[in-house]
Amino acid sequence: MGEHIKQSKFDEVERKTFVENLIDDVKALEILLKRGLVEDDVIRVGAEQEMCIIDKEFRPAGESIKLLELINDDHFTTELASYNLEANLDPFVLEKDCFKKVEEQLLSLLKKGKTQAEKLDIKILLAGILPTISRAEMEMDFMTPIPRYYKLNDNLRACRGKDFRIKIKGVDELSLYHDSVLFEACNTSFQLHLQIAPNDFIKSYNWAQAITGPVLAVCCNSPLLMGRELWKETRIALFQQSLDTRKWTNALKDQMPRVGFGDHWQTGSIAEILKEDISAHRIILTKPIIHNSLQLLENGAIPKLEALNLFNGTVYRWNRPCYGVGNGKPHVRIENRYIPSGPTVIDEMANFAFWVGLMVGRPKKYDDMSAIMDFREAKLNFIKAAINGRQTVFSWLNETRSLESLVLDELLPIAYEGLRKFNVDEKDINRLLGVIEARARKGTGAEWQVTNFRRLKKQMKLDSAIVQLTKAMYNNQQTESPVCDWPPIEHAEEIAESFQWVSQVMSTKLMKLQEDDYANLAVAIMQWNNIHHIPVENTEGELVGLLTWSHIEKLGKIKNNNDIRVSDIMIKKVVTVRPRTKIETARQIMEEYEIGCLPVCSGSYLVGIISKVDL
């Protein structure tokens, strides 16, 4: 999402020209492949590091533009949300100390970012999903002020035709509508790039699809979203749903998701995959194209295929086929988009070495995946891995395998062999793949988060638990120990000074009544659960009243009368606050109105209650 389109008008004239160039770009790519002009004598690796920006209280800090100006390094660029940044690493030839070079550059860039962040009293954190991110950071105020992002948001919404819907069920459940693509910004990744010889592209791509499930399972690092414990890698469900432009209808029909795994093994060439995506997905961004790719080819120049690359950047395959030009030579590569950011640089580099080793070490028996594995098994492995992480049971070549067995006995030997084939330094191979082996045996970042989150929730309020968890993640990250060696969180305490907003202390698991419920049932529920107030909703789920024990006693109408409805006795003019109301303001309102609680609403919908006990 990082390309800035400064001159685009996004009008119909531009769109028409863009479509013509897009079609010509596909033709140009096919010509490049047919003439053998695509580089095939070298393999390079590269990566993109997405990161979270947090304040001193470990919450999202929308300071990316200021931080980017201070860093003043072209390796860094913006992301969709103002609390994220991305660093693009240089490509390196796959050989000898290449992983050491990537690691050194990544550490250097992060150090530069952290040094400048300190001047703004903010920090940088690597996390697949920042635990402290909240619904408040999904508002448009947090979108990075760049025209392309606003246009992307507008066009995706137009394709959808209505608000996006998030529904993810794990241990907990998250279910809501949202009116922008900013939920995508909850996801931060460590995206991996591997250059592929064009004549091996389809074999490599299908192999990349086959290994996606087990690779993801041993890398999981995103189990929490907005205080809910969901999938071990919640990013997979969240990313697909936050950019899902498919229209829901009463008709049963197959529609390709814009974020997806695919639905079949690929054949032909990289051009066939890109044609499939153009055929299935609407063009949502355009830009002026100065030089036509076919004309450039006729003149002996190498085209950048700008229209094709822009379109490809708006289709989010988990294994994305890519075309690029470096040093005047065209190349093709696979971009691995499913690996989460963090928990540490050493963990990320281990993920990188494991994936690259697997890709380049592919045994010959895996050259034709369609002959030995049903595509649906590969896809199901991926979904199960996202949900269950290291506890996934995989289907692999008609056998049932645990992750530990599959990684240790089957995949790690392939990765070792692949890296050695390219003369990668043995010390780096053992160091990095040793981290994968340790995680397969001992646990992933997702497991560390879940274990500590559950323990913290028993000690303190939800908001305090996620703050303490994020704080511990940040502190452990500075040690550069892999996550399988992180200690449990000890002696965490609530920090009173960090409480500012009603959303941080309100109760969210509430009992509610409908306005047509009988009052005697309401009284019984209040007695059984020892509560003194219950919010009342209408059939649309909107807050329409509040029933309090003191109000019931004052009216004295309940005894011996089974016909009274909740709507007859509830308070209809309810004083409410919003999630971002200051706690001190809520306290003053309670004192002024002499009430013991305040419903917390987002629009007309109840999201919590804050009481004197909470204060």
Image (cartoon, helix red, strand yellow):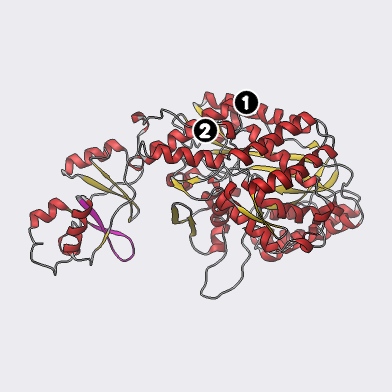
Q: What amino acid is found at the position of numbered circle 1 in the picture?
A: Lys
Total marks placed: 2
Q: 10 Å neighbourhood of mark 1: few (<14), some, or many (≥20)?
A: few
Please, what secondary structure does the residue beneath circle 1 have? Answer: helix
Q: Quadrant of the C terminus?
A: top left
Is residue 6 visible in the rendered image? The answer is: no
Return the residue nearer the eye: 223 or 552: 223
Q: What amino acid is found at the position of numbered circle 2 in the picture?
A: Met
The reply to whether the magenta stretch includes residue 543 is yes
**First to last magenta residue range:** 533-545
Q: 10 Å neighbourhood of mark 2: few (<14), some, or many (≥20)?
A: many
Residue ID for mark 2: 473
Q: Is residue 20 left or right of residue 223?
A: right
Residue ID for mark 1: 111
The reply to whether the magenta stretch includes residue 183 is no
Give the residue at x 80% y 39%: 419
